[in-house]
Amino acid sequence: MTQSQITPTDLLRERIQDDIDSSIVVTDASEVPLYSSDVYAEGTPPALVIKPAEVQQVPSIVKIATSMGFAITQRGGGMSYTGGYLPTQANTVMLDLSALNRIISINEDDLVITVEAGVTWQQIWEALTPRGLRLPFFGTFSGSRATVGGGLSNGALFMGTARYGSAADIVVGMEVIDGSGRRIRTGQAAFHNGRPGFRQYGPDLTGLFVHDAGALGVKTVASLRMMPLPEAAEYASFAFATQQEAIRALSAIGRSGYCEEVYLFDPATTQRSLDPATLVKDIERLGNVIRAQSSVLKGLREGAKMAVAGRRFVEGSVYTLHCVCAGRSTAGVNDDRRGAVNLALEYGGVEISNTIPKAARANPFEPLNGILGSQGERWAALNAKVPHSDAERLIAATEAAIDPYRDRMAASGVTMSFLYIAIAQHIFSYEPVLRWFDEWLPVHRQIPEKAFLEGLTEPEANLEGRALVDEIRSAIVGVFAEFGAASNQIGKTYPMLASLNPETRAVLSALKAELDPDELVNPGALGDFST
């Protein structure tokens, strides 16, 4: 190769190989497509993919790359569907942080675990369970692959979320590498002789780097709160004939604090998750309801109500709400479950088999076959977080925005389902999910189990459906912005920066300028800081 043929990427590769470690540069061309796409879309291929083997290598990698004018994006488990780690420009170095997967320490006395950013939620669960410990929020649906660094960047939530919130609520400190390669520590460990523990000593610097979509720096280490593993758990599931009854019950139970998890499936999701015959049998099973009452007369009255309710459910689709109660004693957990049951019944729910929440807790980290639908269809989710009092209005506005697309959806094979979640007692999460048949992306072909994929046939390209999904997603994102809704996994999909009031935006822009003066750290994440 002559001097004139040497490209900036060649020079960067040589510097990384000579100054740091030749083995950390990904050279297999067959892996590039996986790094050029996420679960939803394909993007610009990165100029170079680097997979650090040690935390200490990251500051040098970032400093070398940005000093040579290369942008940096960070990839953990690769589960983004909002373009979170996809490059927006060709001269991008993608950091695959999945090899930073060591648990640094588990301090049982102080109830703090410190891990590298590539550690998965499943790794932590498996390390802590034998010790009788757990994280308060302890993982996502994709926790067998999703990483702590990605979760802190993108607002990971689900397991334990109704009571304890999200990943952002349990982190007590981090190490972050900024655009100049500086190593920034946050929390109590940032102080002389300090160790991870209390998060706030002065301004909460940890909070600045949480949910930043990787726009403010590269997370390498995080310390998280632990708790004793609950000694008892109970489960409850309910069917509701109407959406309004179901979401009001979700909010009531979420506010109560009775449950660690409270989530609601719409009829489409319910049909995929439950055997309809079993559901009908549960709804019509009146004997147990009658026997559970304090008197025969009361039991007969409740039985009559159930008979009427049963006819309502059998005649139409149902929403199903699922609860997990957990705590230190069987008596206390039973009290919590009883409280959740009473609230669900008050809003018109009928108790059904609790198979779904029980199975989810028994196997919290399943293989990621679910990134494809059961028939091989693709899916992409959006989400909005609002106070409980805004939930019904937000849902109505979103459905009104979707209505004009119904005919085109039917013609293109695009369908929708919805997931609703309670967060930390005070927040309602609404998640529309678009589904359509389309050719798979690399992640769909490589991540699910082989046996699962062998039972499916990859669909043909569906350009019309894909374009329609893009259009509907944009309309929904617009509704969420009108409500001032928050969203997790912001990536490059939500207009977060543009939605801020000018004064707040100026502060965030100043912070970005300090940490990333050349705007090379995940450009486009959170929005366009150059405008």
Image (spheres, rainbow, N blue to C red):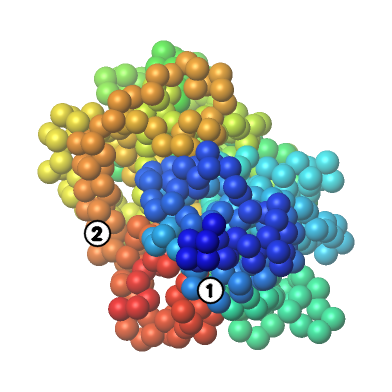
Residue 139 percent coordinates (x, y): 61, 47
- As drawn, the residue found furthest toward the front would be 2
Q: Which amino acid is tagged 1? A: Met
Compared to 126, does 299 lie above or below? above
Label 1 residue SS: loop
Q: Which mark is residue 320?
A: none
Quadrant location of the C terminus in the rendered image: bottom left
Q: Which mark is residue 68?
A: 1
Residue 250 percent coordinates (x, y): 43, 46
> For residue 209, which quarter of the picture?
bottom right
Say whether marks 2 and 1 touch (CB < 8 Å).
no
Residue 301 visible within the image: no
State the residue position of label 2: 478
Residue 389 percent coordinates (x, y): 35, 59
- Residue 57 is left or right of residue 85, and the answer is right
* In-front residue for pair 123/362: 123
Q: Which amino acid is tagged 2? A: Gly
> For residue 506, which quarter of the picture?
bottom left
Residue 182 visible within the image: yes
* In-front residue for pair 464/282: 464
Compared to 476, does 377 lie above or below? above
Q: Residue at x 27, y 23 (%)?
A: 316
Q: Residue at x 53, y 42 (%)?
A: 29
Which of disc 1 and disc 2 is earlier in sequence?
Answer: 1
* In-front residue for pair 438/163: 438
Compared to 425, does 280 lie above or below? above
